[in-house]
């Protein structure tokens, strides 16, 4: 049964569609083949109310999965499941769903979407895991693991919410990029029904399926959650992101800006798409002319030397997008002091892994603490496309993140740190990495490289 066409608000997606852009059509499936969540009609009502805010999205709500065919799916930029059980989709329809996503269609799962299709394992692979109980139904603290995503950028570092909290099985961080997770200190870890020994309860994640994007959020059991503006923006940000994989969105819209929430939280923009006023050259008062704003990106166009932030930072969170061309190499360093030598300080490596010799060793690959600590895995995207990086530096504690995955963490001065430094080319640099504050630096390694959305927020200890 089709309920009708709705327009979804795109405000939570972080930007509005450009004038003349194609409308993003989204299919919302709310069939229950097992337990029927009482909140389902309310969820439809909430999206109906949100629909009046903007015409950029059109939403079709359906309660009948048997209507999903290749032809039906081809009409939509994304399909959203808030479902349970073995839905009435035959083998051909299931194959059509997988083909649709792998060809670039978006797939979104809400709450019990992981409580669906237990007898069809490829669905588990698509969504990322299966429901395995809900040990808690209470107010909890949710950690924001990736605050750069359109589904989370308004949520801060953590937030409190009252909801039914899922755990999942046949789920691993190796297969998804986690956006939200449960802060286990906010719940009773002796509660009955807990099956995960690793104490890892992800509550929202993304993943790629071929050319398509998959977004899942475990929140949404309660009507008051659906009425919560934070959840609405979280959900719509995820839908908009997934729908963008199968639609023609202008990539430059909404870049190099701060949201109202980011500004209120103290984030600072180091590049606005046109001005390089926040930067100068290393060991020089002016700025190398080879670094320019090109199509909204801070771009190295010719050899010109390393860039240095004019301001100094001690404890901070830094986020930035980066992309390189075939075989490209660069890096972002922190707490940099200007000396007679090169700006060799702890570095977030920027690299085309498959096209550069440094990519052959994990310890010098993209996202590494260059030559000292290796990332857990390669999460870089195709050469020439944007990657999103995040660095947290607080006291001696440092974290590297990329594309929603925590790649590594280390403590400056620890025995592990010392072993890594002594085994590297930095062994003879006295006090390597020990500066308590300093500049941010972008490395000119002789290759074209581009950066955007360079944002920093100072932290207290």
Image (cartoon, rainbow, N blue to C red):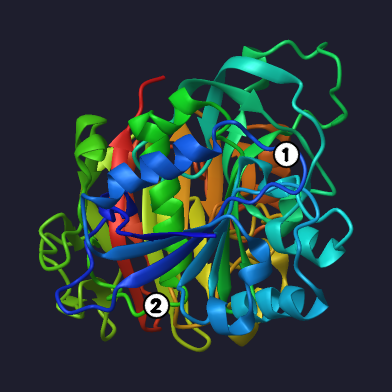
Location of the N terminus by quadrant is bottom right
| Nearest the eye: 271 or 14 | 14
From this viewpoint, is residue 191 visible? Answer: yes
Vertical relation: 175 (above or below) 400: below
SS of the residue at dot 1? helix
In the image, residue 355 lies at what x, y percent?
Answer: 60, 86
The first of marks 1 and 2 along the sequence is 2
Q: Badge 1 is on which residue?
A: 416
In the image, residue 86 lies at what x, y percent?
Answer: 81, 55
Left or right relative to 450: residue 203 = right
Vertical relation: 356 (above or below) 377: below
Vertical relation: 365 (above or below) 352: above
Q: Are marks 1 and 2 in contact (CB under 8 Å)?
A: no
The residue sitting at 53% across, 73% down in the picture is: 351
> For residue 443, what is the image quadrant?
bottom left
In the image, residue 315 lies at what x, y percent?
Answer: 38, 32
| Nearest the eye: 437 or 389 | 389
* Distance in Å between CA atoms under marks 1 and 2: 46 Å
| Nearest the eye: 140 or 385 | 140
Vertical relation: 290 (above or below) 408: below
Q: Badge 2 is on which residue?
A: 247
| Nearest the eye: 98 or 325 | 98
The residue sitting at 35% across, 35% down in the picture is: 437
**Label 1 crowd bin: few (<14), some (14–19), many (20+), radius 10 Å:** few
SS of the residue at dot 2? loop
Location of the C terminus by quadrant is top left
The residue sitting at 44% across, 33% down in the picture is: 226
**Label 2 crowd bin: few (<14), some (14–19), many (20+), radius 10 Å:** many
Left or right relative to 166: residue 145 = left
> For residue 456, what is the image quadrant?
top left
Q: Which mark is residue 300?
A: none
């Amino acid at each position: 049964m089709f309920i009708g066409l709705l327009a979804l608000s795109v405000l939570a997606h972080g930007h509005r569609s450009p004038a003349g852009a194609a409308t993003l059509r989204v299919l919302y499936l709310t069939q229950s083949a097992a337990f029927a969540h009482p909140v389902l009609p309310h969820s439809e009502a909430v999206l109906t109310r949100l629909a009046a805010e903007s015409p950029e999205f059109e939403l079709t709500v359906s309660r009948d999965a048997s209507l999903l065919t290749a032809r039906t799916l081809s009409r939509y930029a994304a399909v959203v499941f808030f479902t349970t059980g073995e839905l009435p989709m035959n083998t051909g329809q299931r194959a059509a769903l997988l083909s649709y996503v792998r060809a670039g269609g978006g797939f979104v799962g809400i709450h019990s979407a992981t409580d669906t299709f237990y007898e069809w394992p490829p669905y588990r692979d698509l969504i990322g895991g299966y429901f395995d109980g809900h040990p808690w139904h209470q107010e909890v603290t949710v950690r924001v693991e990736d605050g750069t995503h359109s589904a989370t950028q308004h949520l801060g570092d953590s937030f409190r919410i009252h909801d039914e909290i899922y755990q999942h099985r046949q789920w691993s961080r190796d297969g998804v990029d986690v956006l939200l997770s449960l802060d286990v200190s906010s719940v009773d870890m002796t509660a009955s029904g807990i099956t995960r020994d690793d104490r890892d309860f992800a509550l929202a994640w993304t993943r790629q399926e071929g050319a398509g994007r998959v977004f899942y959020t475990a929140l949404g059991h309660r009507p008051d959650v659906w009425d919560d503006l934070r959840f609405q923006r979280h959900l719509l940000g995820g839908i908009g992101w997934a729908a963008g994989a199968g639609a023609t969105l202008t990539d430059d819209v909404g870049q190099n800006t701060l949201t109202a929430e980011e500004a209120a939280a103290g984030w600072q923009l180091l590049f606005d798409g046109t001005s390089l006023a926040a930067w100068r050259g290393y060991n020089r008062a002016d700025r190398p002319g080879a670094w320019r704003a090109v199509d909204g990106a801070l771009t190295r166009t010719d050899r010109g030397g390393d860039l240095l932030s004019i301001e100094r930072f001690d404890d901070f969170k830094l986020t930035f997008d980066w992309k390189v061309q075939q075989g490209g190499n660069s890096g972002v360093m922190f707490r940099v002091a200007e000396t007679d030598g090169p700006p060799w300080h702890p570095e977030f490596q920027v690299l085309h892994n498959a096209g550069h010799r440094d990519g052959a060793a994990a310890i010098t690959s993209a996202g590494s603490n260059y030559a000292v600590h290796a990332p857990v895995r390669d999460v870089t995207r195709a050469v020439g496309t944007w990657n999103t990086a995040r660095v947290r530096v607080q006291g001696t504690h440092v974290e590297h993140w990329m594309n929603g995955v925590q790649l590594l963490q280390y403590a400056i001065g620890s025995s592990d740190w010392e072993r890594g430094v002594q085994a590297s080319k930095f062994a003879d640099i006295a006090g390597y990495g020990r500066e308590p504050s300093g500049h941010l630096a972008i490395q000119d390694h002789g290759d074209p490289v581009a950066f955007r959305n360079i944002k920093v927020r100072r932290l207290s200890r």
